[in-house]
Each structure stands twice: as structure tokens, then as C-alpha cells.
Image (cartoon, helix red, strand yellow):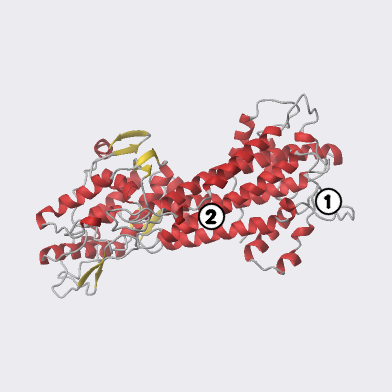
Amino acid sequence: MMEIILDGENLTFEQVTAVAYGSPGSPGIALADNAKANVLRSAAAVDTLLERGEIAYGITTGFGAFKDKIISRDEVEELQRNIVVSHAVGVGKPFDIPTVRAIMLIRANTLARGFSGIRLETLELILQFLNLGIHPVIPEKGSLGASGDLAPLAHFACVLIGEGKAEFDGEVLTAADALSKCGLEPLSLKAKEGLALTNGTTVMTALGLLETARAIRLAEVADVAGCLSLEALNGTTSAFDERIHALRPHPRQIDCARNLRRILDESEFVREFDPTNVQDAYTLRCIPQVHGACRDAVAYAEWLIELELNAVTDNPLIFISDASTSDAETVGHGDAATESSASPRLSVSASIEVISGGNFHGEPLALAFDYLTIALSELGNISERRIMRLTDEASNAHVLPAFLTEHGGLNSGFMIVQYTAASLCTENKILSHPASVDTIPSSANVEDHVSMGATAALKLRHVAENLELILSLELFCAAQAVDLRRKAIGKDKQLGVGTRDVYTAIREKVPFIERDEYMKDHIDAVTDVVRRFAPERTA
């Protein structure tokens, strides 16, 4: 992925993750020529409205409850600066660099559609930030999710005008110093630009996208962890028979069962037919039904985010019914149009409409993120129950010793590993209360219903982080249990094709635990394996 060309319509999930986790300039980001032409026309429309003296929300009026306050033409630039600095009231710790990079890329793509009235030079400065590695310091908290993510986006916009703080080359600087180090000048915002920069669903989309990418990986890890636990517990694969799942044709249940069969293929640890033990506990037998249902939530979030990436979500939006210009032969054609940041003049006959709507409202995202949060919490719940079965001798029918130690009593073994998993699951259950069912009116009750989409996304991030740890704890236990089973069934017995490499990766970092020792470093090492896990997309 050498370069990403933004046109406002074709940004992909994979491109955002590449930019978020990539180095500045790798991949590089540039604007498509048609996007430049559209941005120029939209900026020209704003200029035309000012020349005509027309009243347009956010251009010649105040914002929110001040929508009826008319702003004179000589104050419109101050109005735009004021919205940025007054809205920069976020609190809490700052977002990590990948999230900030995702925010800037998604915002740039939205503005590239040419319905927001922003100037080309403003948009290109955002791309310079990405390519050079100037990362605004954006506090996590302060968004209500309508009118979009106002407070966090204001912190991003502040750096464009030389206000606030930014991270550059590993150092947090004043925005002015960060710009100076890169030979850049701060902008003076023109009409509509402050509103265009701060209004929209960008922050919640960026957060949700990165956590959905993590969820895709964790759904695969959950399948592998469940299979390794099944092997350690002398489980059977009969419940994964494709004929069973064909009779309840939920697509991702079927996909999950297929994936489990692939992972356990060639395993010599699974139980053959035993008339005295014909079925396993639900945490093993119902993996396709539970994991498959959770995969539904992942797939829905991915689908929704791919739509949102190329949506225009600010307000108001500018529509031009006649986009011809007095110099039409150069607009969008040749170097003069693509290199100049000056807006062309629209023809006298151009019809310009500034229409207020509600695309900034984060309700679709909030609902999806709450759904995904619940699903990831469930993946953690079933994983913790498998940990319990691995460590409880009575529950696993004495297949494994109590707490996965051969010297119980003197040694506690893996007893407290299950406690930690239970603690994380309880925290996830509390965090799974949906944010989207709450609303607090704002702006003197003009903005009287809000989505809490950013709150839903932040909760999703917390639950995903906890799930990553729960699955790491399960793999830690399952690897220990596999070694204990090998002592009973033979050291030469082979794991399944999809579990053996993960088991080996764990054993390269973590030994079999003979007697009690400091466990935290081992858990961290297994967590590192989980974070580096590359999923095989099975659907």
C-alpha cells in the first residue's frame, strides 16, 4: 500500500488501519483530482453566499442555540475561530497515536466529498499532518455523539490554527512549535471551516473501526482458545458436525463450526465416540452457537463502519445545482486547478442551497458499538467458564489435576488465574450496559436527543482490552493443561492443525509451570502472542 488517494467515496477499512498503525508517510496520502475540484467548488459556493449576503446556518449565523444570531460579514472568520477554541473542552487522557491518525484520515475523506465548504489548503494541511507525523493531542472524553464529536474534533482543529498541543517525533509540543518544526504556518479559518472541522461522527467512527479490527482478530483467537481447551479437556468434535449447523442456517454459526473443524483437524487429543460420555458441557459443545452469534455483531459493525467511512456527516451541507464557473476550463483540469488553493468563482446562474440536517447524529454507530460490546463480553464469559472447567478437577471429570498443578496444596497452581478472568468478566458485564439508551439534552434543549456514540465506542475499547486478557488467560491455562494431558496420553500426541502453532508460540515464551512462581510475566508473554495473532478470515 504505497499511497492512498482520497476522493471521499472509496476509503476502506484496511486503508484506515494501515494509516493508523503505519509510520507517517507510509502509506502516503494524497487527494484525487476530482476531490480537489469538488472542494474548490464548495469553497466557492461559500464565497458566493457571502457576496450575496444570504443567511446560512453556521456561515452567517451562530451555532446551536445561537442559530438565530446573525453574524456580519466582517465577523465570519472570527466566528469560525471561536467555534474551534470554545469547543476544545475535552477532558481525560489523550487518545493514542493510531486513533488520532484514524480520526484525521476519516475527517479528511469526509471533507474531500466537497459538500462541507472547506478550502483546499485547509484539507491539504490535514494530509500534511498525517504524512509528516503531526498528531494533535485529543482528550478522550467530552463527546455526546450529536452534533457529532464536537469537543474532541475541536482539539484536532485547534492545531490547524496554531492552538492547543500536538505530538511530533515523540514529543508533546505547543501546536505553534509543532507546525514551526515542520516549516508550516497555522491557518486563519474562513467562513464555514470551523464548523466543517468540528461537526461529524469522525471520532466514534475511528474508535469503532479500530476496535472492530481488534474484534475480528479476537473472534479468531476465541475459536483457537476454545479448541485448545477442548483438546486439553478430552472433548469431542461431534457437536461441530456440519449437518447439525445446516439445520439452523445462521451463516456465522456455520462459519464458526467450519473453522473449529479446520482448527481441530488431525488432532490426536479429541475424544472418539464413547457411549459413556456422549456429549460435552455447553462451553465446548455450543462454541459455534455462541461464537457464531458474536461474529454476527462483529460483521454488522464492520458493514456499518464501511458505510460511515465514505459518508458526509457534518452540517449544514452545501448543494450546488449548477457547478459551472466563470473559468470552467481550468477547474478540475490541469495543474492550475489541482495546485491552486484559491476557490473559483461560481457562475451567476449557480443555485446554492445550504441545507441543515442531522447526519452528524451517531445513533447508527452507537447501537452497533453497544451490540458489539455485548458480543465481546459474551466471548469473555464463555472463555472464563472454560478456564473454570480447566482448573476445577470435579468439573473436568478428573481429566486434569486441580488448578493444573500436580503438587496441589503446597502449590496453588492456576487457581487465581480464574479469579482474574472472573474479575475482568464482571467488569465487562457492567460496561455492557448500552450507552445508546441514554440521552442528555444540550445547547439549551435545541440538541435535545444525543447518541452517546463516542461513549459507546470508549466502552467497546475497554471491553475489547479486557477480552484480549481473558483469552490470553485461557490460552495460558490451556497450554498448561495440554502438557498435563500429554503425560497421560503420550508426549508424541499431535494437536490440531490450527492449535499446534499457537501452542508452540506460547511455549517459546512461557514454560510449563512445575511449581508456583511469579505468573505476571508469563501472562504478559501470552498476551503478546494474542496481540500478534494474524487471523484467518473464515467468512
Q: Is residue 133 left or right of residue 469?
A: left
Position in image of residue 418 (x %, y %): 67, 37
Of residue 76 and residue 502, the one placed in the foreground of this image is 76
Disc 2 is placed on an element classified as helix
Disc 1 is placed on an element classified as loop
| For marks 2 and 1 on the same chain, the one whose residue lies earlier in the sequence | 1
- Would you identify the image quadrant in which residue 184 lies? top left
Q: Amino acid at mark 1?
A: Arg
* Above or below 506: residue 454: below
Position in image of residue 171 (x %, y %): 35, 33
Q: Is residue 410 left or right of residue 354?
A: right
Q: Which mark is residue 271?
A: 1
**C-beta proximity under 8 Å, tags 2 and 1:** no
Position in image of residue 241 (x %, y %): 76, 62
Asked whether the viewer can see residue 532, the reply is no
Q: Amino acid at mark 2?
A: Leu
Position in image of residue 99 (x %, y %): 42, 46
**Front position among marks 2 and 1:** 2
The residue beneath circle 2 is 372
Q: Residues within 10 Å of mark 1 (few under 14, many from 20)?
A: some
Query: Quadrant where the C terminus lies?
Result: bottom right
* Residue furthest to the top: 410
Name the residue: 69% across, 55% down: 287
Q: Which mark is residue 499?
A: none
The Cα atoms of the two marked residues, 2 and 1, are separated by 34 Å
Name the residue: 79% across, 28% down: 408
Q: Residues within 10 Å of mark 2 (few under 14, many from 20)?
A: many
Q: How many marks?
A: 2
Of residue 294 and residue 493, the one placed in the foreground of this image is 294
Asked whether the viewer can see residue 57, the reply is yes
* Above or below 174: residue 386: below
